[in-house]
Image (cartoon, rainbow, N blue to C red):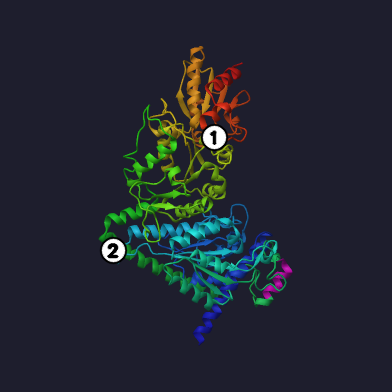
C-alpha cells in the first residue's frame, strides 16, 4: 500500500508539474493557451509514462512510437512533456516560450524542437498526419518484418481536440483510417467542450462516439480525464484492438484547477493572470515557485528514461540479429529510413524525342510505370481520379485492410485528407509519397500543401487538367489562378512541363529533392514534343528556366512560356525570324528552381539588357512581372474560362501564335 501511495503521489506531482510549467510559461510570455495543457496533463502523462515507447536519449529511434499533439495551440503541454521526460529541452527554453529564437515556439514545429514529430496548429492537420504515420508503419512492417523479427512495430498516438474534430480534414482522414483498419492508431480526444466562442453547445452537438463507430473505429469513453487508472485501462484496451483505429473520448476540464476560469473560454487563449495563478496554486496545493519542478518528479522521470533506453537497447539487439539473418533487407530498411533513393532507380527512366507527342499527364504515367518497380518506397495514389491522373503503377496492388503491403492508394474523394496523410507518411520516414487530383482542386488541399512546404517535406503533388485546355467541363474545373497561387508558397516547387521530356525531367529533379514539396501541373490535352527540351534534367527543366530556341546573336526579344503554351512561343519565334527579328524562347517550367540558380546563369538566360519580353501562360498574369519588368507584355488568362472544346477555347481567349507575335512587336516598339 505504501508503494502504491508513493506512485500516486509521484503521478500527481508530475501532472501538476506539467500544468504549472504551462501556466508559468504562458504567463511569462503574456501569450499562449494554458487551459488545454491544464486539462489534459493527466492523460498525456499516463500515455507517456505507461504506454509510449520512446527514448529521450535518442528522439530519432526508428521504432519509437509517434506522438502528435494535433491540438497544437496547447504546445506547452508537449514542451513540458519533452522537458520533464528528459529530452534536450532545458528549462531555459521553457522560460523563453514564444520568444525569438527559442525552441518553444507558439505552436509545435518539428524542424525547431527535437522530439516534436510534426508541425501542428492549423486544426485537423495533426489528425491527418497521424493517419499517414500509421499507414507508413503498417506498410514498412509488411515489407520488412519476418517471423520472429518484428523490427517495425510501433503505435501512433495523438491528442485531438473539439476543434480538430470539427475541421473537415479530420472527417476525411478518419474515414480512410477506419476503412483501412489501422489498428496501431490511437487518439485521445480532449473532450473539454469549450472553444474560443464558448461552449461547444453553440455549434458542435453531434455524437462524436457514434460518428467514429460508424467510421469503423474502436471507441471507448473515460468519464474523468484526471483518473490516471481509467485512462491507463482505456489505453491498454485500445492497444489490444488490432483491427481498428481507436478513439478514446476523455472528458476533461479546460483550465483544470483554476477557481474562476476552469470550464470557460477565458482559459483557452490567454494567460490566467497573477491573481488567478495564485488561486490555482492554492486550489491544487502547489507550493513550488514559477518554473520549479520537485526533485521527486525529476528522479521519477529519470528512472523512466532509463527503462526507455533499455527498450531501445533490446531493439538494437534484435535489429543486429535481423541484420545477420536478412542482411539485404536490413540494409534496405536502413536506406529507406535514411531517405536514400535506391541505387539505379532512374535506370529505366523513359526518354522522349520529337514526334513523341502526348499529354504531360500521360508522360507522367509513363515515368511512374518505369521507375515504380525500382522504387517501392515511392507510394501514392489519387483522390478518386486514377484514370484521369494516370498515377497507378502497373503490377502494384491496392493498399487495403487485407493488403497492408499494397503499393497504391485509393484515397477517395478526400483531397485535403489525402494531402495531410501524405505529409504524415513523409514525416514517419521510409516513404516517398505522392498524391494526385485536378489542379483546380488544389484549393481543397492548400493548407496541407502549405505545411508540406513549411516542414520541408518531399511530397510530390501530381495535379492534372492544368488549364482551360481541359475543355468542356467549363470554368468550375478550369484552373486560372492556381499556378500563381501555388507559386506564392515559399519552398514549393511548381513545375508546368511543356512536353513529355520536361515532365520526365521534373520527376527526376523532384525525386532528388529532399527539402521540400513539388507540384506537377500536367495537361489533359496532347502536347507537341519540342526540340530543345531533351537532355539531362540538370541542363534543362531541372534548372527551372532555360533556353529552348535561340536566334542569332543578342536576342531582340525574349519569349517566355510554360506548359501547353510554350509551343506558341517557339512557333512565334520562327515567324519573327522570317522578319529578321532574333527571338529567344525560354521555358520557365519552374520559377522556384530558376531562382535558385546563380545570378550569372539567370542573367545569361534573361539578359538584363533585353527589356523586350513576352510571357505566355494560360493562367493569370499576376507574378510574371518579376521577369517581364515594366516593358513586358503578358499573354494570359485574367478571367474565368468557359465550356467548349479546348482548341476553340485557346483561340477565343487569345492563345495563338498571332497573339504572341503581336505582343512581341508591341514590346519592341
- In the image, farthest residue toward the left: 325
Looking at the image, is 245 positioned above or below residue 509?
A: below
**Picture residue at 51% right of the left edge, 12% below the top:** 579
Region rendered in magenta? 272-281
Q: Quadrant of residue 443?
A: top right
Crowding near the residue tagged with mark 2, few <14, some 14–19, many ≥20 C-alpha atoms within 10 Å: some
In percent of the image, x 41 and y 28: which residue is there? 529
Nearer to me, 188 or 354: 354
In the orientation shown, which residue stands out farthest toward the bottom? 1
Considering depth in this image, is 269 or 372 the residue closer to the camera? 372
Query: What type of secondary structure mainly makes up the magenta span?
Result: helix
- C-alpha separation, residue under disc 1 versus residue under disc 2: 58 Å
Residue 283 shown left or right of residue 236 in the figure: right
* Label 1 environment density (alpha carbons within 10 Å; few <14, some 14–19, many ≥20): many
Residue 546 position, x and y percent, is: 47, 28
The residue beneath circle 1 is 468
Q: Is residue 622 left or right of residue 339?
A: right
Q: Earlier in the sequence, mark 1 or mark 2?
A: 2
Amino acid at each position: 500500500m505504501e508503494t502504491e501511495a508513493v506512485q500516486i503521489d509521484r503521478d500527481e506531482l508530475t501532472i501538476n508539474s506539467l500544468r504549472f510549467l504551462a501556466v508559468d510559461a504562458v504567463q511569462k510570455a503574456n501569450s499562449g493557451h494554458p487551459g488545454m495543457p491544464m486539462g489534459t496533463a493527466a492523460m498525456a502523462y499516463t500515455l507517456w509514462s505507461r504506454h509510449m515507447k520512446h527514448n529521450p536519449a535518442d528522439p530519432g529511434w526508428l521504432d519509437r512510437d509517434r506522438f502528435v499533439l494535433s491540438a497544437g495551440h496547447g504546445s506547452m503541454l508537449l514542451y513540458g512533456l519533452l522537458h520533464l521526460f528528459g529530452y534536450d529541452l532545458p528549462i531555459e527554453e521553457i522560460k523563453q516560450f514564444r520568444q525569438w529564437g527559442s525552441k518553444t515556439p507558439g505552436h509545435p514545429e518539428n524542424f525547431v524542437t527535437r522530439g516534436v514529430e510534426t508541425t501542428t496548429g492549423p486544426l485537423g492537420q495533426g489528425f491527418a498526419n497521424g493517419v499517414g504515420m500509421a499507414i507508413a508503419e503498417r506498410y514498412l512492417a509488411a515489407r520488412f518484418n519476418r517471423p520472429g523479427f518484428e523490427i517495425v512495430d510501433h503505435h501512433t498516438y495523438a491528442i485531438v481536440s473539439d476543434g480538430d474534430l470539427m475541421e473537415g480534414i479530420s472527417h476525411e482522414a478518419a474515414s480512410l483510417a477506419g476503412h483501412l483498419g489501422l489498428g496501431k492508431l490511437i487518439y485521445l480526444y480532449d473532450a473539454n467542450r469549450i472553444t474560443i466562442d464558448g461552449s461547444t453547445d453553440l455549434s458542435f452537438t453531434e455524437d462524436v462516439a457514434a460518428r467514429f463507430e460508424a467510421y469503423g473505429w474502436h471507441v471507448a469513453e473515460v468519464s474523468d480525464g484526471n483518473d490516471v487508472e481509467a485512462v491507463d485501462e482505456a489505453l491498454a484496451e485500445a492497444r489490444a484492438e488490432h483491427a481498428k483505429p481507436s478513439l478514446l473520448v476523455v472528458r476533461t476540464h479546460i483550465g483544470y484547477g483554476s477557481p474562476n476560469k476552469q470550464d470557460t473560454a477565458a482559459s483557452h487563449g490567454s494567460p490566467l493572470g497573477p491573481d488567478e495563478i495564485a488561486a490555482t496554486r492554492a486550489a491544487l496545493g502547489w507550493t513550488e515557485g514559477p518554473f520549479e519542478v520537485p526533485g521527486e518528479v525529476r528522479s521519477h522521470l529519470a528512472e523512466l528514461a532509463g527503462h526507455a533506453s533499455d527498450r531501445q537497447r533490446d531493439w538494437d539487439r534484435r535489429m543486429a540479429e535481423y541484420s545477420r539473418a536478412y542482411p539485404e533487407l536490413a540494409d534496405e530498411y536502413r536506406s529507406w529510413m535514411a531517405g536514400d533513393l535506391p541505387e539505379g532507380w532512374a535506370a529505366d527512366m523513359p526518354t522522349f524525342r520529337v514526334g513523341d507527342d502526348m499529354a504531360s499527364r500521360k508522360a507522367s504515367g509513363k515515368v511512374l510505370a518505369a521507375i515504380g518497380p525500382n522504387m517501392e518506397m515511392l507510394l501514392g495514389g489519387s483522390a478518386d481520379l486514377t484514370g484521369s491522373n494516370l498515377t497507378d503503377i502497373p503490377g502494384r496492388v491496392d493498399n487495403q485492410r487485407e493488403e497492408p503491403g499494397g503499393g497504391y492508394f485509393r484515397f477517395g474523394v478526400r483531397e485535403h485528407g489525402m494531402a495531410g496523410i501524405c505529409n504524415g507518411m513523409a514525416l514517419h520516414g521510409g516513404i516517398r509519397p505522392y498524391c494526385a487530383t485536378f489542379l483546380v482542386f488544389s484549393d481543397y488541399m492548400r493548407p496541407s500543401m502549405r505545411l508540406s512546404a513549411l516542414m520541408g517535406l518531399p511530397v510530390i503533388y501530381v495535379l492534372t487538367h492544368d488549364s482551360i485546355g481541359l475543355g468542356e467541363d467549363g470554368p468550375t474545373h478550369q484552373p486560372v489562378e492556381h499556378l500563381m497561387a501555388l507559386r506564392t508558397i515559399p519552398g514549393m516547387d511548381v513545375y508546368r512541363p511543356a512536353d513529355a521530356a520536361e515532365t520526365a525531367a521534373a520527376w527526376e529533379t523532384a525525386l532528388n529533392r529532399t527539402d521540400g514539396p513539388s507540384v506537377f501541373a500536367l495537361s489533359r490535352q496532347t502536347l507537341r514534343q519540342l526540340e530543345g527540351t531533351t537532355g539531362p534534367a540538370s541542363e534543362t527543366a531541372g534548372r527551372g528556366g532555360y533556353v529552348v530556341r535561340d536566334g542569332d546573336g543578342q536576342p531582340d526579344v525574349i519569349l517566355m512560356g510554360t506548359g501547353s503554351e510554350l509551343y506558341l512561343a517557339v512557333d512565334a519565334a520562327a515567324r519573327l525570324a522570317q522578319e529578321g527579328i532574333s527571338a529567344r524562347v525560354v521555358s520557365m517550367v519552374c520559377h522556384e528552381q530558376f531562382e535558385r540558380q546563380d545570378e550569372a546563369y539567370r542573367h545569361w538566360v534573361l539578359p538584363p539588357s533585353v527589356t523586350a519580353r513576352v510571357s505566355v501562360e494560360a493562367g493569370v498574369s499576376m507574378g510574371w512581372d518579376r521577369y517581364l519588368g515594366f516593358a513586358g507584355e503578358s499573354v494570359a488568362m485574367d478571367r474565368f474560362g468557359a465550356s467548349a472544346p479546348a482548341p476553340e477555347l485557346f483561340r477565343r481567349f487569345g492563345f495563338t501564335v498571332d497573339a504572341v507575335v503581336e505582343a512581341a512587336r508591341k514590346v519592341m516598339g
